[in-house]
Amino acid sequence: MNRRWLPLNALRAFEAVGKHLSFTGGAAALSVSQSALSRHVAALESLLGKQLFDRDGGRLTLSPAGAELLAVVSKSLERIEQTMNAIRDESTPARAMRLHVPPSLLQQMFMPMLAEFRRDHPEIRIDLSSANVTGLPSTELDMAIVYDRPNVDDRITDLLWMVRVAPLCSPATATQARGQSMEEFLGRQELLHLKLDDQPRDLLWGDYLRRNAIAIPVMGGLAFDTAIASAKYAMTSGGVMLGDVDMFAEELAAGTLVMPYDAVIEDGYGYYLKLHADDLADPAISSFRSWLIGRFAVLHGPIAPE
């Protein structure tokens, strides 16, 4: 395929249909007829020898090939549009960098870091989003910090840190641990769970207890969507969370959360920075990636039990 023969109209038509998952919606967005849009998409599928959409009755979804192509076409057209607008307006191109950060990380640690970066780089525009998902969100992004197990995909992946967890609770709850083994203490407490996508609600506690040779029921208790919600409940209402000791280092230092036992382990999950290799050509993305890796490298420190 030579760039001289790239079917630009067909690619624009495909993007419109792909974004709306509807030929009607795509046609309205481009102010063209639905039949014209259908012909362009059919011609593109014929050229590629691949089906770009799966059609199940009246429902339209992207095929694997379509999803792969849509991400590249959307990003390319967006950059062309923004650069041309900047040239027309005689201004320096300043495309906003789209960044995703998980909610608890955003609230606990990332906000001050972001303010620090903005002081040093006020010229870099950032559009920040946050969704409670394990792994990559479905939205279009330039960079994403994700909470996940180690995995391999087509993106550059930088480990920011591996999560270290231990039972954490309020000072009042921690007083009940005196003179008790960790198994005795946890067996008498309400365990607070962190829910992960498509995983059993007791996954994290169950794994932690097995690795510490503790046999107590884990199916009960409350389950939360975010670690910060679990921590707030533990601090104000009781129960024991399996908390990230680095994420809640300030609360541990202040004594609003307590770690009754010296029982910190890595649970197999971590925070990773993910981006496409071709996006490193963008100086803003490259600079932010280097800064972020360096900034997270200084976060770990010893945590002492109460």
Image (cartoon, helix red, strand yellow):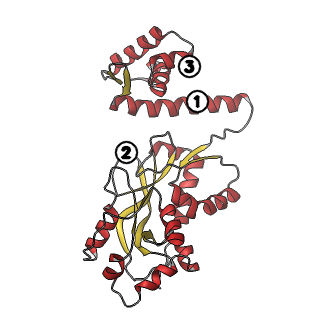
Residue 231 horizontal/vertical position (percent): 50, 67
Look at label 3 and name its amino acid: Ala
Confirm or deny contact between disc 2 and disc 1 (CB under 8 A). no
Look at label 2 and name its amino acid: Asp
- For label 2, the residue is 154
- For label 1, the residue is 80
- As drawn, 214 above or below 74: below
Look at label 1 and name its amino acid: Ile
Q: Nearer the viewer, residue 41 or 180?
A: 180
SS category of the residue bearing label 2: loop
SS category of the residue bearing label 3: helix
Residues at marks 3 and 2, CA–CA distance in whole angstroms: 31 Å
Q: Earlier in the sequence, mark 3 or mark 2?
A: 3
- As drawn, 282 above or below 62: below
Q: Is residue 142 left or right of residue 216?
A: right
Q: Quadrant of residue 90?
A: top right
- For label 3, the residue is 29
| Screen quadrant of the N terminus | top left
| Mark whose residue sits in front, 1 or 3 | 3
Residue 182 horizontal/vertical position (percent): 34, 82
Q: Nearer the viewer, residue 141 or 217?
A: 217
Confirm or deny contact between disc 3 and disc 2 (CB under 8 A). no
- Residue at image position (70%, 52%) is 122
Residues at marks 1 and 3, CA–CA distance in whole angstroms: 18 Å
Q: Earlier in the sequence, mark 2 or mark 1?
A: 1
- Residue at the limit of the structure toward the right, as seen here: 90
Residue 203 horizontal/vertical position (percent): 31, 61
SS category of the residue bearing label 1: helix
Q: Nearer the viewer, residue 76 or 226?
A: 226
Residues at marks 2 and 1, CA–CA distance in whole angstroms: 24 Å
Q: Residues within 10 Å of mark 2 (few under 14, many from 20)?
A: few
